[in-house]
């Protein structure tokens, strides 16, 4: 890739903006596409994105734009940071333009219709594109404020992984590579659900032991589910699995944790989501995940429990009580108890 060619970031939310700034710091020209002309103008004139990353100065190499066709034409490497609900609709009309491009999804969500991950939607829209995903314990504000951060780029396309490593790797941001795109992406999407539960537990003053138990059992549960779908269980011991799960389930900066915390304080789901004012992907994912787990007959008591709290009028205390009464199984599914 020549230094002259700009890199596209689609989506002017907190993560899209943070990634755009990171690329600019590494000396790249960036086209940051967003739908809202006012937001684009505010970045252009004030070098700020006050709605999503208040107080972070956006570098001059980041050019905000509202012209998607032109952006896609100018760039070979494209980071897709659109909400899961908007991704297909935004990109479908441009499928011909995406052929041969390198598309890297940073969105941690699942499309309800057919249980599709973002990279699978990109594949459907642009079968000729080269596709990867970026996922890990990456809170947008911390990335933007240069907290030391590591992430994973995952793709079967090794050249794409190397390319993403080359443009994003910097003094505060490390990029590891993985060939398990499906596992890495699934880890990013599933952990959002458990973060809601962790936020509720924190608001209700549950002990550290309890929260640790929830996080560890969440890891067991999401790994069991992902392996059933064909992911590598070892992926979940990495940054995109346990790494992302820890940060999302323990940080008040995590959007899904904030929604859970508001629920634990007694707000309704609607109130909790509107208080946040941003997309919390976990709320969309929980319904899809429960249906899929039942269809595949994968044992996911935490998912069933959280669904009962959010949509069936149960309390978290009732759900945890039921979990504690359940039959304890082996600690880790992939180590047999007979010594293998």
Image (tube, rainbow, N blue to C red):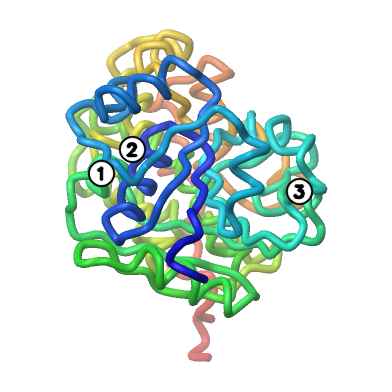
Residue 97, numbered circle: 3
Question: Quick check: 9 above or below 200?
Answer: below
Q: Is residue 51 left or right of residue 337?
A: left
| Front label number (2 vs 1) | 1
Mark 1 is surrounded, within 10 Å at the Cα level, by few (under 14), some (14 to 19) or many (20 or more) other residues, namely some
* Residue ID at (64%, 46%): 72
Q: Quote the CA–CA distance across marks 1 and 3.
A: 41 Å
Q: Nearer the viewer, mark 2 or mark 3?
A: 3
Which quadrant would residue 40 be assigned to in this image? top left
In this view, 218 is above or below 152? above
What numbered label is drawn on residue 198?
2
Q: Counting residues from the N terminus, which is met first, the one under dot 2 or under dot 3?
A: 3
Q: Label 2: few (<14), some or many (≥20) within 10 Å?
A: many
Judged from the image, the secondary structure of the residue bearing numbered disc 3 is helix
60 left or right, relative to 282? left
Which residue appears at 52% of the width and 73% of the height?
A: 161
Residue 250 disc label: 1
Q: Secondary structure at mark 2?
A: helix
Measured from the top left, where is residue 239 in percent x and y?
38, 65
Give above or below for 135 relative to 276.
below
- For the residues bearing labels 2 and 1, Cβ distance under 8 angstroms: yes
Q: Eyeballing the image, is 16 above or below 174?
A: above
For marks 1 and 3, the one nearer the N-term is: 3
Report whether 294 appears left or right of 164. right
Q: Please tell me in which quadrant of the rendered image residue 28 appears.
A: bottom left
State the residue at coordinates (79%, 45%).
95
Within 10 Å of disc 3 (Cα), the crowding (few <14, some 14-19, many 20+) is some
Q: Nearer the viewer, residue 167 or 215?
A: 167
Residue 158's mark? Answer: none
């Amino acid at each position: 890739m020549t230094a002259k060619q700009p890199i596209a970031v689609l989506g002017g939310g907190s993560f899209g903006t943070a990634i755009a700034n990171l690329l600019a710091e590494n000396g790249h020209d960036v086209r940051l596409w967003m739908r809202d002309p006012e937001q684009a103008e505010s970045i252009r004139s004030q070098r700020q994105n006050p709605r999503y990353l208040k107080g972070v100065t956006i570098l001059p190499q980041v050019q905000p734009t509202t012209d998607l066709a032109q952006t896609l034409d100018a760039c070979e490497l494209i980071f897709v940071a659109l909400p899961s609900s908007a991704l297909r609709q935004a990109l479908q009309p441009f499928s011909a333009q995406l052929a041969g491009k390198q598309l890297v999804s940073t969105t941690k969500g699942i499309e309800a219709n057919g249980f599709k991950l973002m990279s699978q939607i990109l594949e459907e829209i642009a079968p000729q594109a080269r596709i990867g995903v970026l996922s890990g314990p990456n809170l947008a504000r911390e990335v933007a404020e240069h907290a030391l951060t590591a992430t994973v780029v995952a793709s079967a396309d090794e050249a794409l992984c190397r390319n993403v490593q080359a443009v994003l790797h910097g003094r505060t941001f490390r990029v590891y590579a993985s060939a398990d795109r499906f596992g890495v992406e699934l880890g990013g999407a599933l952990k959002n659900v458990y973060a809601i539960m962790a936020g509720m537990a924190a608001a209700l003053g549950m002990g550290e032991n309890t929260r640790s138990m929830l996080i560890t059992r969440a890891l067991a549960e999401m790994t069991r589910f992902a392996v059933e779908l064909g992911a590598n269980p070892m992926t979940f011991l990495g940054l995109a699995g346990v790494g992302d799960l820890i940060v999302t389930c323990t940080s008040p900066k995590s959007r899904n944790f904030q929604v859970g915390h508001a629920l634990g304080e007694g707000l309704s789901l609607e109130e909790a989501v509107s208080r946040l004012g941003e997309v919390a992907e976990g709320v969309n994912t929980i319904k899809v995940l429960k249906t899929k787990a039942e269809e595949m007959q994968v044992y996911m008591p935490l998912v069933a429990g959280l669904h009962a709290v959010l949509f069936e009028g149960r309390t978290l205390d009732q759900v945890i009580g039921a979990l504690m009464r359940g039959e304890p199984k082996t600690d880790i599914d992939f180590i047999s108890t007979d010594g293998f």
